[in-house]
Every structure is written in C-alpha cells, then in structure tokens.
Image (spheres, rainbow, N blue to C red):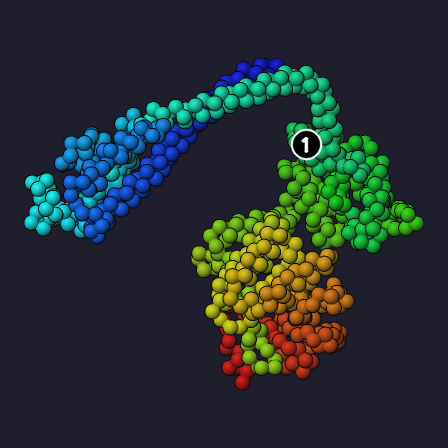
Amino acid sequence: MKSFLNDRILKTVPVIFLIVILLKITYSYFEAKEREYEFAKKEAEVLNSYAMESRLYYQKLFLNGSLELNEKTLPALPAFSSPIISENFSKNNPLNITVKTVSDRARNPKNKADKDELKAIEFFKNNRSESTYFNNENGKLYQYATVLKVEDACLRCHGEKETAPLHIQNLYENAYDYKIDEVRGIISIQIPTQNLNKYFYEDFFRSALFDSALFLLLFLSVLYLIRQSKKISVALEEKVEEKTKELKDSFLYDRLTRLPNRLKLIEDIEQNNGAKSFHLALINIDAFKDINDLYGYEIGDEILIQVSKRVRDYCKEFNSVYKLPNDEFAVFTTMSISDEEFFATIKKMLNAISETKFDVSDQSMFITFSCGIASNQDSLLIKTNTALQIAKKHSRNIVIYNDSLDAKEQIIKNMDALLVLKDAIKYDQITPYFQPIYNTRTKKIDKYESLARIVTNSGEVITPFVFLDIAVKSKLYPEITKAIITKSFEFFRDKEMEFSINLSIVDIQSKEIMRFIFNKLQEFRQPQRVVFEILETDRIENYEEIKNFIKDVKKYGCKVAIDDFGSGYSNFSHILELNVDYLKIDSSLVKFVTTDENSRVVVKTIINFASNLGLKTIAEFVEDKDSLVLLEKMGVDFIQGYYIGKPSSSLNRDFESTAQ
C-alpha cells in the first residue's frame, strides 16, 4: 500500500510542476501585456502634453497679436503644422509614434481622420464629459486621442466670416459659424504595437525561460528527495511503530502509579459490554486536597502510590485496578460473583486500608474513603459516579447505585437545567435584575446589584439556584457573565447611580472574559460607576491574579467589593493587599445578627476592621426592620436585602419614601 502511494506521488509530481509552470508562464504573459498597455498609455499622455503645449503656445501668439496671420505664419497653425510635426517626430523615435491633429471634416486632406481616429471622434461626440480616449482594438496599434472642442479663442477665426481675419476669409469659404463646445477633431497619437511587442515579449520570453529552468531544477530536487524518502521511510516505520506503542501506553496508563487510567477503564467496559456479570467501584480519598495543601504535592503523590499498591494487593483476584484523575481509583471486574460478594470485598478492603497508618517522610496519617458501587447496569461508569457523589455529599462510606436513588432525579433536573440554560443563551434570555442597596448615611437608595435571571418567552423568571451550578460544570458560565455585563452597561448607560456586577475567580482567570470586560469599560461613558464584586467563597488561591485584576480595573476608576466576606474562609491579612473598596458581610452572619451573639461579634469585628482600613461595608440578607436598625447602630455603611427591596427588572426606589 505504501509503495503504491509512493508510485502515485512520483507520477503526480511532474504533472503538478507542469501545471505550475504553465500557470506562471500564463501569468507572466498577461503581466507583460499589461505593462505594454500601461507603457503605451503613459507615453501617449506625455506626447499629448507636448503637442497641447505647442498648440496653445502658437494659438496665444496669434491671439495676442505677437504673430500676424498671413501667408508666411499660416503654417504655424495646427491644421498645417501637425502633419509636418508628425512626420519629423515619427522619423526620430524608435517606436514610430505619430502625432496628428485630425478631424472628420478636415479642410486639409492631410488632417483627415482614419477609421481608428473616427471611432475616437465618435466616442467624444457620444460622451461629452470625456476628454481622453485610449484603446487597442485594432491590434496593430494603440490609439490615444484628446478631444478638440470649439472654444472662445476658436471663434476669432471661425465665428462669423465678416469678423474673421482677412487672410482666413480669402482662404476658406465654409470654415465659419462654429459653435461653442462643438467637437471639431482630436489630437491623435498612434503607437504601433510591432516594436512594443518586440521589446516587451523579449522580456517575457527571458522570464518564461528562467522560470522554466528554476522549476525544472526544483522538480529534480523534489524527485530526488521523494526517492530518498522511500529509503528513509522503511527505517522510520519500525521506529514509529515502537513510539506508537509507547504513546498508546502513555495514553492508557497513569504516569505516577503505572495503573491503567480512565481511558483504559472506558475501553475495558466497552469491550466487556456483553459480559454476564460486571461490577465497578469508584473510590475517592476524602479531603485529599487538604493533604496536598498541608503536606505538599510530593507527599500527596507518595500517598497515591501507597494507596494504589494496597488496593491492588486487596483486589488481586479482580486484576482490574485503575487510577483515575486526581484522587480517585476504580476496581472493575467481569467475574461471575454476586453483587453482595463484590460489595463485601470492597468494604473489607476500604476498612482495612482506613485502619492502616500511612507513614510518609516522617509524617503519619490515617486516610478515609468514599466509594460508589454499581453492578450490571447500563451506563455503568455514570451510575457508579452518581453513587460516589451521593456518598461524598452525605459523608457515607459506601453507596450502592439503584434506580431509587435521589441522584437519578437530580441528574434529570441537571439535564433540564442545562437545556434551559442553552436555550437562554441561544435566544438571549439571560437578563439582569437589579436589587437596591440602601445608604445608611444619606437614607437613600443610591446603588444597585445586577443579578442574573433567565426570563423565558412565557414570562417565567428562573433564578440562579436552578442553573448556576450546571453553568459552571458545563463551562457555560462565561456566557452568563458576558450577558449580564453587556445588558447592565446598556441599562445604566444614561443613569447616574453606581451598580455592581458579580465575578467569580473563574471569570478573573479567563483571558476571554478579561478582554471582554476591558473592551466594555473602554466603551462605557462613566466606568467609575461600575463595581465588581468578587466572590470570596470561591476560595481564592492565587491572590496575585486578583491583585492584577483589581489594579487593571482601577485604572478605569472602577471599584471592587469582596462578596460573602466572613463566610468561613475569609482572610483578613489578604484584604490588606487587595486594595478593595467594599466588604459585603456574608448573609449567614447578617440573618442571625439580632438573635445570635457570636454573629453580632463577628459582624462588629468586620465593620471595625473595614472602618480602620477606610473601607465601606455592605450588609446582605437584611429582611426586617430590627436588623436594619441594629446594623445602622453598629456602623454599617450600606444595607441590602428583601426588606429594602427585591431584585426587579426595573429600578425599585420605593424604600426611600417609606423610610421617611
């Protein structure tokens, strides 16, 4: 097969080169013709300017009286001088160019227009606004012409006979009663193509010969390389096969543990799809991220290696242990055992490993696991993962998948939510709703937060609770961010109040979203009215990215708020570095501020902390008057919540009048 392909290539190469040579020669030919055409036209334009200058010069001499019109000076007139000039000019130029003044009603036979010149005169009569004419329809010559129309100066001799110079009256009987703007003739320049062709085609043939020689040399070089490649390819084939096997192994086996990976698991499940019995367990190390954060990735990797060895030791009879991404393992078997036997084996293994201390680099620790199991199920990997997610969510050691699991209903809900979200993006249904923010100093609403909603064609308003989680998982979250920014900027374009937009760490880490935001800020008339709220609950890990983002948006005059501050992961020291403007106190603290002493202490601490740094505080989730009064006394700058106003598609300012 490969030999056949090489033979086909060898036969195709000369055809390709021949086609390329013909195309290049054809291109060169038309290029030569075009250059000849442009040369002829430019030459004619230059000669015409000389002829016109000569004509105007002698005309001026006659008109201003410098020359008296008589028998001696008459040959200076264009009608008489043109044939002589043309004859002398043609003799003294290598291209045999002729320059004449001609007419379709010439008094002098030598000035009578030929058929090419008559075409030019007819052209000017039909196109009164044109002043020049150029073509090579003849094939033997290029015809260039400049129109000669009757002007005021012409009427001195050719107006009324009684007013014409006496010499003209004696010479002509019917060269009178000319009309202004009447076409009487042309200055005709004719350039024969014979000598032009000789000059330009010599250049064309030299170019064609050079191109042919160059392509021939290139063809021979390519032919040589192809023949050599046939020899090299034989040696390479063996090397490629060897590397292909290595590459395939790298795709199907985990580099760290040398266990088969997720791709191999999927392949094995598909290959054993017709087995009478098959079982799968997915095992996840609990809180493995905390191990990495606390002890470092090197110890984390060593833990994975040790876990892989212990799982393999306990599952020797299954002979199918896999290392999945991150901190997950899988056990798959097609042995003819019952569901109960598989469950008992996995449970015994997990209990044994959990009771065994791991000693790594002078560190000792115990590890617990979450596990999901599915047996003899369609979509085996998906359903096993469903069981694992339930185990992790409810802190259960092992969950066995069955059709009654609540997760099945959740999957359906997620699929429905994903469909709703995709339709919302497709039909532009993502809409900002604006929740008012009350200023405790001015006693007025002077800010709003833009919150994402989906408004369907039927008018149903869907809150983020339904679609936000699936938006993150499905990678559609950036589309929500872009829609809210675009529509909020447009809504507040002609309004003077401040408004805020939520951004996640995912947004800030996205180069696409960052470019989008900065483009919008450049277009927005008053970017200083924009506040970006960064979700503090997103567990900020790279504060350098946040600092750079804040630095960049503040160049436009924007403000920055940390949202959900006090939610359990707040880092007071990092706030000092971030140069923010607002801290939004988390709702979990605010909603209990009137009933829980600890909440009051934390809220007061945040308010004092912010005040000392010159930052403003915003209390979220305020739903009653008592909370409002207490928070005002504690020194909160702004209040937000249903007591002030619910999110709405329009700006709600009713609280201002009610508060008075």
Looking at the rendering, which quadrant does residue 239 occupy?
A: top right
Q: Is 462 located above or below residue 374 in the figure?
A: below
Q: Is 511 located above or below residue 602 in the figure?
A: above
Residue at 63 percent of width and 66 percent of height: 554
Frontmost residue, 170 versus 227? 170
Looking at the rendering, which quadrant does residue 130 occupy?
A: top left
Residue at 35 percent of width and 33 percent of height: 40
Residue at 84 percent of width and 38 percent of height: 309
Q: Residues within 10 Å of mark 1 (few under 14, many from 20)?
A: few
285 horizontally vs 464: left or right: right
Look at the image and tell me in which quarter the C terminus lies.
bottom right
What SS does tag 1 mark?
helix
**Can you give x and y, in whole percent of width and height, for residue 75 in the image?**
20, 38
Q: Is 277 located above or below residue 350 in the figure?
A: above
Q: Is 434 located above or below residue 385 in the figure?
A: below
**Can you give x and y, in whole percent of width and height, for residue 214 in the image?**
55, 22
**Can you give x and y, in whole percent of width and height, for residue 390 in the image?**
69, 50
Q: Residue 127: tell me if it is visible.
A: no
**Can you give x and y, in whole percent of width and height, for residue 254 in the image?**
76, 37
Look at the image and tell me in which quarter the N terminus lies.
top right
Q: Residue 210: tell me if it is visible.
A: yes
Looking at the rendering, which quadrant does residue 382 occupy?
A: top right
Q: Which residue is mark 1?
A: 267
Residue with the most extreme right position: 362
Frontmost residue, 152 versus 63? 63
Frontmost residue, 229 versus 220? 220
Residue type pointed to by label 1: Glu
553 horizontally vs 40: left or right: right
Residue with the most extreme bottom position: 660
